[in-house]
Amino acid sequence: MAFPNDTTTGWTDSDGNWHSFLKSPRPDYSRHGGAADRGSADRYYGRVASPHYYVGGTQTSERVAITDTGSPEYAAYMQAYDSETDRKDWG
């Protein structure tokens, strides 16, 4: 069965294998400090995309740079970054 390469439902790893976010257990990339949380925050505050996440809470734990563009963390970060529509009003 073929799956779409749609980062809202899953990701394709570097070997071309499809992985679904819909399988249980689903990683919580949106938790505070998670990849999606960081992507959304970076876009909101007008920062350039710099895929990363924190092992625990934001700025209270180790920061991990995401260098594997085929990873689920990268997909979660970029999907959140690209879909964030709100912007900080610095005014």
Image (spheres, grey):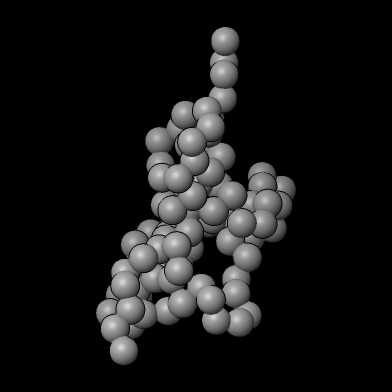
Residue at 68% across, 51% down: 32
Residue 63 visible, this orientation? no
- Residue drawn where x is 31% and y is 89% of the image: 1
Q: Nearer the viewer, residue 91 or 52?
A: 91
Quadrant containing the C terminus is top right
**Between residues 28 and 33, which one lies in front from this camera angle?**
28
Lateral position of residue 32 relative to residue 79, left or right: right
Camera-nearest residue between 83 and 40: 83
Image check: 46 left or right of 6? right
> Is 3 located above or below residue 62 in the figure?
below
**Number of numbered labels in the structure image:** 0
Up/down of 53 relative to 48, above or below: below
Residue 13: in sight, yes or no?
yes
Q: Position of residue 80 (x, y in %)?
A: 49, 49
Estimate the x, y position of residue 6 in percent, counting from the top left.
Answer: 36, 65
**Residue 50 spot, x, y in % from top left:** 42, 45
Q: Splitting the image into 4 quarters, where does residue 23 fall?
A: bottom right
